Image (tube, coloured by chain):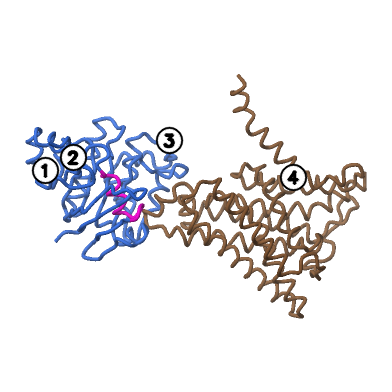
């Protein structure tokens, strides 16, 4: 039992990261109508800038800032492609374009970072925050969950209490009507891409030491992130936050059960399947009748 | 002097010409009415003017400044407002939030409520839950708050009860009387001509008639002939 609890708590860091990446995915979808498969890859690019600078001997915190800046810029670059050439495309076309971009970013990233070559990723927040039921809860776990919750609260406040947030909600509803009213649609879209790029980069910097710091592995964290976003049906920030954390906990617990531990990476797919079946049940039932 | 001057304008859709060599103008304080049968190119004309679709050639000038290559947002900031067909409210926002989105410096929400007092009681209601007439009032009021010099209105009567259409027409006349230049595309020809100053009739992407609204209103046979050709 204690082993299961220890594994579950160990999954909290991953859960916080899934939650934050998921909330960023919901933010991007709600405001610029893109199911963004490049979310984690954007953060990975920024994280590898940190790794490269750290390995070259630069001090850690300036390297973190440079990494976040790089992640923001990659986010803005992807956003520029999406708003400039695919702004009026359908949601499925936009999603397909981000899948193509993900493949491209992974290919470039693996080439530049030496593929499976091991890297020295500094642990930004080492150590334990507190003990819970006899299990150490790491600072990284607390921080990723806190960051995800903070982003959720800030996103809600930003969208509901500021003029820019109001303009973004209008933009998400009817982009052309918003542009016809003089709203700077491209600038606001790039703001969304830049903000999510910065947050995902920081989240991945925290989780990277616990994963194999490989460009592809980190980029594919988009799968559990989108599973979490699907729990929130790409609308609710809070359900996405909860979905991400629960996903991390379940993955953690699964790792302590020998018979299923090797299949734990399939858990996000099972969640996606379960949510799709649940959310579509009424439509399918109506069809069957 | 005309606020909006459109010269030799051509607009294509899927590389086929829909509007060709078109010249129109709209003066401050006046309503220019554009009439024509379905497929004449009226909506395409307005979409080309506001930048929703690119123009193939010609010029569009507001106060003498050519804007035909500018993006829709830039044209809006130059003083062009477009009330699109289909009552394009922001569905998830309330009435008041819809108005606040377009609130430019110097404008006041009170102006919108003064034009359509019906919206005051509905200020906290989500726009998707408003009636068709209220939604149309909201998009016109929203456009007004961008402080436009020229207002383009496309088929505002579509799907609305005659009493609501009459109410909307009188509000548009009031806006023109306050100095706005209005270009009104409308299917309800008689009602539009009754509030308009200058009438254009389009057929197959070209202006086939340019004259006084009252004269055309008094000649229904002429209007019928212009619509159908011959």
* Residue B213, numbered circle: 1
Q: Nearer the viewer, mark 4 or mark 3?
A: 4
Residue B205 picture location, percent across and down: 23, 46
Q: Nearer the viewer, mark 2 or mark 4?
A: 4
Quarter occupied by the C terminus of chain B: top left
Local crowd size for mark 3, using a 10 Å CA cut-off: few (<14), some (14–19), many (≥20)? some
Residue A67 picture location, percent across and down: 67, 70
Q: Name the image quarter holding residue B50.
A: bottom left
Tell me whether marks 4 and 3 sit on the same chain.
no
Chain at numbered mark 3: B
Q: What residue does disc 4 label?
A: A268
* Residue B129, numbered circle: 3
Measured Cα–Cα span from mark 2 to mark 1: 9 Å
Q: What residue does disc 2 label?
A: B192
Residue under the image location 24 percent in, 61 percent down: B62
Question: Element type at marker 2?
Answer: helix
Q: Majority secondary structure of the magenta segment?
A: helix
Q: Colour of chain B?
A: blue
User: In this view of the protein, which residue sits in the foreground, A219 or A32?
Assistant: A219
Question: Element type at marker 4?
Answer: helix
Q: Is residue B89 left or right of residue A73?
A: left
Q: Residue furthest front?
A: B16
Measured Cα–Cα span from mark 2 to mark 3: 28 Å
Measured Cα–Cα span from mark 4 to mark 3: 37 Å
Residue A139 picture location, percent across and down: 79, 61
Tell me whether marks 2 and 3 sit on the same chain.
yes
Q: Name the image quarter holding residue A24.
A: bottom right
Query: Residue B48: within the magenta?
Result: yes
Q: Are marks 2 and 4 in contact (CB under 8 Å)?
A: no
């Amino acid at each position: 039992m204690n082993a299961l609890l220890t594994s579950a708590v160990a999954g909290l860091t991953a859960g916080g990261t899934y939650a934050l990446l998921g909330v960023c995915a919901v933010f991007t979808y709600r405001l610029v109508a893109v199911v963004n498969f490049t979310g984690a890859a954007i953060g990975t690019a920024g994280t590898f800038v940190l790794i490269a600078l750290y390995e070259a001997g630069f001090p850690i915190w300036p390297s973190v800032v440079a990494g976040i800046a790089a992640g923001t810029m990659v986010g803005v670059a992807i956003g520029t492609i999406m708003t400039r050439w695919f702004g009026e495309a359908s949601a499925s076309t936009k999603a397909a374009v981000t899948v193509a971009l993900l493949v491209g970013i992974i290919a470039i990233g693996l080439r530049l970072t030496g593929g499976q070559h091991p890297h020295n990723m500094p642990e930004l927040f080492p150590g334990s925050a507190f003990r819970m039921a006899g299990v150490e809860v790491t600072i990284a776990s607390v921080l990723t969950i806190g960051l995800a919750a903070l982003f959720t609260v800030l996103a809600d406040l930003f969208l509901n209490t500021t003029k820019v947030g109001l303009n973004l909600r209008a933009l998400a509803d009817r982009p052309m009507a918003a542009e016809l009213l003089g709203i700077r649609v491209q600038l606001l879209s790039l703001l969304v891409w830049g903000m999510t790029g910065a947050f995902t980069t920081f989240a991945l910097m925290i989780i990277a030491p616990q994963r194999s710091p490989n460009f592809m592995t980190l980029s594919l964290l988009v799968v559990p992130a989108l599973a979490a976003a699907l729990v929130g049906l790409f609308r609710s920030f809070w359900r996405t936050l909860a979905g991400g954390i629960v996903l991390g906990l379940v993955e953690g617990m699964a790792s302590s059960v020998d018979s299923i531990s090797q299949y734990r990476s399939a858990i996000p797919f099972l969640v996606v399947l379960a949510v799709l079946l649940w959310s579509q049940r009424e439509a399918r039932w109506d069809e069957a009748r | 002097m005309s606020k909006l001057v459109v010269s030799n304008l051509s607009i294509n859709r899927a590389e086929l010409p829909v509007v060709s060599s078109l010249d129109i103008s709209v003066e401050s304080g006046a309503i220019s009415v554009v009439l024509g049968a379905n497929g004449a190119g009226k909506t395409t004309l307005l979409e080309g003017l506001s930048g929703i679709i690119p123009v193939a050639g010609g010029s569009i000038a507001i106060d003498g400044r050519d804007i035909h290559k500018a993006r829709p947002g830039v044209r809006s900031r130059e003083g062009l407002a477009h009330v699109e067909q289909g009552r394009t409210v922001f569905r998830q926002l309330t009435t008041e939030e819809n108005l606040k989105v377009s609130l430019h410096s110097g404008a006041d929400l009170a102006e919108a409520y003064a034009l359509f007092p019906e919206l005051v009681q509905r200020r906290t209601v989500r726009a998707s839950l408003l009636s068709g007439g209220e939604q149309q009032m909201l998009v016109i009021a929203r456009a007004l708050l961008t402080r436009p010099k020229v207002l383009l209105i496309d088929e505002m009567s579509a799907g609305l009860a005659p009493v609501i259409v009459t109410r909307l027409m009188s509000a548009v006349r009031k806006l023109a009387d306050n100095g706005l230049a209005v270009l009104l595309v409308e299917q309800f020809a008689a009602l539009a001509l009754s509030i308009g100053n200058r009438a254009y009739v389009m057929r197959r992407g070209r202006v086939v008639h340019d004259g006084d609204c009252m004269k055309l209103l008094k000649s229904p046979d002429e209007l019928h002939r212009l619509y159908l050709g011959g």
